[in-house]
Image (cartoon, rainbow, N blue to C red):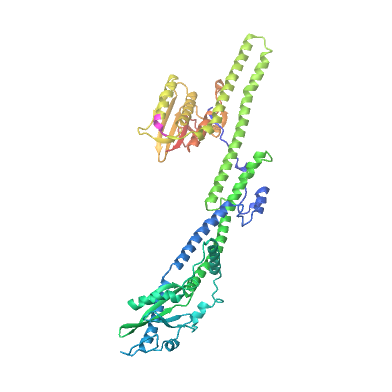
Amino acid sequence: MRDTTVTQGDRGGDVVLGDDWVAPQNTVSQELRNKRAHRSLLSLRTSPLTRKIITFNLIALIILVAGILYSIDSRDSLVRQRANALVGETQLVGDVFEAQLADGFPVNLATGDGVDVATTLQGLSLRKGVEVFVYDTSEMLVGSILGEEQTPAIAALNSRESNRTIISDGLSAVGSGMARVFQSGSDVPQPVIEEQLSSLVAQALIGGTQVQTLRDADGGTVIAAATPVLQNGSPIGVVAMVSPAGEIDALVRREREQVLQMFVVALLVSIGLSLVLASTIANPLADLAEAAELGRDRNARRVNPGRIRIPDLSARPDEIGRLSRALRGMVSALYNRIDGNEQFAADVAHEIKNPLASLQSAVGTLRMVRRDDQRAKLLDVIEHDVRRLDRLVSDISNASRLDAELVKEDEQPFNLLEMLDNLNQHLGEDARSKGIDYIADLPPDPIVIHGLEARLAQVFVNLITNAISFCEDGDAIRVWARRRSNRVLVVVEDTGPGIPDEALSKIFKRFYSQRPAEHFGNNSGLGLAISKQIVEAHGGVIWAENIRPTEADVTSDPLGARFVVGLPV
C-alpha cells in the first residue's frame, strides 16, 4: 500500500480553555477568582488603563469648559448692552436739565444760575448703585447723587444669599491668593471714579456723548457715560452716569457659576461613565492577562503547572471578544501542538522499537549460529534494519523541523506550472526508464501562487514518486492542472493497483504503510503525512480516491489511484 500520514486528531475535549463569561465562577480557577474578589470597581491604582480613560475624558471636558469660560470673560456683548442702556439713561438726565433752561438766559451750573443742580438731581428716579455727576464747562464737579431705588432686578442681582457663587468665589479666592504670593512689589491703588471721569467729560464737551469702561476702587468693572447739556447748541455742562459697582462682574460671575455647576455635574457623570467604561474594558483584559500570567508563573515555578484557562469572552461583540477568541484559539492550537508532539514522540518510539527489536533478535541469534549461510542471512537482516533505522531517523528529523520551517520561511509568488514542468521533465525520465508511460497535461497560461516553492515541490515529488513506486511496466501516470475560480487543482493519476477501500481513511496517517512484502521497510510512512502538512499550511487541501470505470458502481475494481491537491490562487 501507499505511504500515509497520521493527521493529528482534534483533542479539543482534553483542552480546558476556561470559563464562561456569563457564569465565570463555575469554571474559573481559584487563583483567578481570588484576584477578582480583590479587584474593586474603583481600581485606579492597579489599572493604568482605567486612569488613562478617565484622564483623557476629563481633559476633553476641561478644555470644553475652559473655552466656555473664556468666551464668557471675553464676551463684550453684555458690556455693549449695558453701555447702550446707560447711554440712554444719561441722555434722559441731560434732557431733564435742558428742559429747565430758558432761551437766551445765561446759565452757570456752578452758581446755580438758570438751573438748580441739586434740586434737579434730587428729583431723579435712579436705580440703586447708579451714580450721576454734573460738571460745568471748566470740568469742575458741581453736583452728584447715588441712586437708592431698589428695583426687583437689582435686588435679585445683588442678593448674595439668593445668588451665591460658591465655585466662582472659591476660584477667585484661590487666584487672588496665588497672585499675592507671586506678585512682586506693592499694589498700585486704583484712581477713584471722579478722577477717571475727567477725560471722559473733556471728550463729551468736544465730541458729544461718550461711553467708556472703567475700574472702580475695588478693581471691578463699571461703565461710564457722559453727555453734554446744551443751550442753543452750545454746551453749558456735562452729565456723567456710572453703572453700579460690580454689576457687570456679578453678571459674568453668575454665568460663570452656572457653567461651573454644570461642569461639576458633567465631571461626576464623566468619571462615573469612565469607570463603567473602564470596567467593561480593563476588567476583562485584566482577566485575560491574569489567566495567562497564572499559567506562566505556574510553569516557571514548576508547581502544579496545569493548563491555562482563558476566560470565554467570545460572546462580546467587540475587540475584547475578538481577543478572547484569538487567545482561546491560540491556546487551543498550542495544546493541540503539544498533544501532537506527544503523540508524535509516542509514534516515533513505537516505530523505532520494531527495527530495534529485530536487530536485537538478529544479534542474539548471530552469536549462536555456526553456518555461514545463516550468518549471511542474519547480517542482511541487520543491514536492512540499520538502513530502516537510518531512514526513519532522517524522515523523523525532517518532519520535526517542518513546522518551524513553515513558520519562519517567507512565502513568495512563483509560477506553479513552471515548477511542475521542471518536475515532470526530471521524474518523467525516471518513470519512462521503468516502462511507465508519463503524461503531463498543463495549461499554457502561467498560474502564479504565493507560497514556499521548495516545500510544495516536495509535495508533488512525494506524490509522483509514490505513483511510480506502485506502477509496473505498461502502466501510465498523468499529471495535470486546472484553474478553478480562486483555486488551482493539481492531480496525479496512475493506473496502478489503486487504494484499498479500508485504507482510504488511513492513508494520510503518520507511519501508516501497507506495501508489498518485497518493499517492507523501504518507506517510513511519513511521505504523505508531510505532504498533507505542507498543503494545509498553504491553506490548501489534499485527498486521495480511486479511479473506477463508473461512478455508479463503487464496488468495481479500481483502474488506478488519484491524488488531488487544491491550492488557493
Residue in front for this viewpoint, 454 or 469: 454
- In which quadrant of the rendered view does residue 376 lie? top right
Where residue 131 sits in the image (x, y, percent)? 45, 80
Above or below, 351 relative to 235:
above
Where residue 257 sits in the image (x, y, percent)? 52, 69
Q: Is residue 490 left or right of residue 16?
A: left
Residue at x 41%, y 71% (from the top left corner): 77
Q: How many marks?
A: 0
Above or below, 167 relative to 518:
below
Residue in front for this viewpoint, 170 or 10: 170
Q: Is residue 549 left or right of residue 366?
A: left
Residue at x 40%, y 28% (from the top left corner): 421
Above or below, 188 relative to 156:
above
Q: Is residue 494 magenta?
A: no
Q: What is the magenta range?
A: 413-418
Q: Quadrant of the N terminus?
A: top right
**Residue 98 seen in the current view:** yes
Above or below, 432 relative to 283:
above
Q: Is residue 417 magenta?
A: yes
**Residue 306 seen in the current view:** no
Where residue 502 sits in the image (x, y, percent)? 56, 33
Where residue 415 sits in the image (x, y, percent)? 39, 32
Q: Quadrant of the C terminus?
A: top left
Residue in front for this viewpoint, 533 or 78: 78
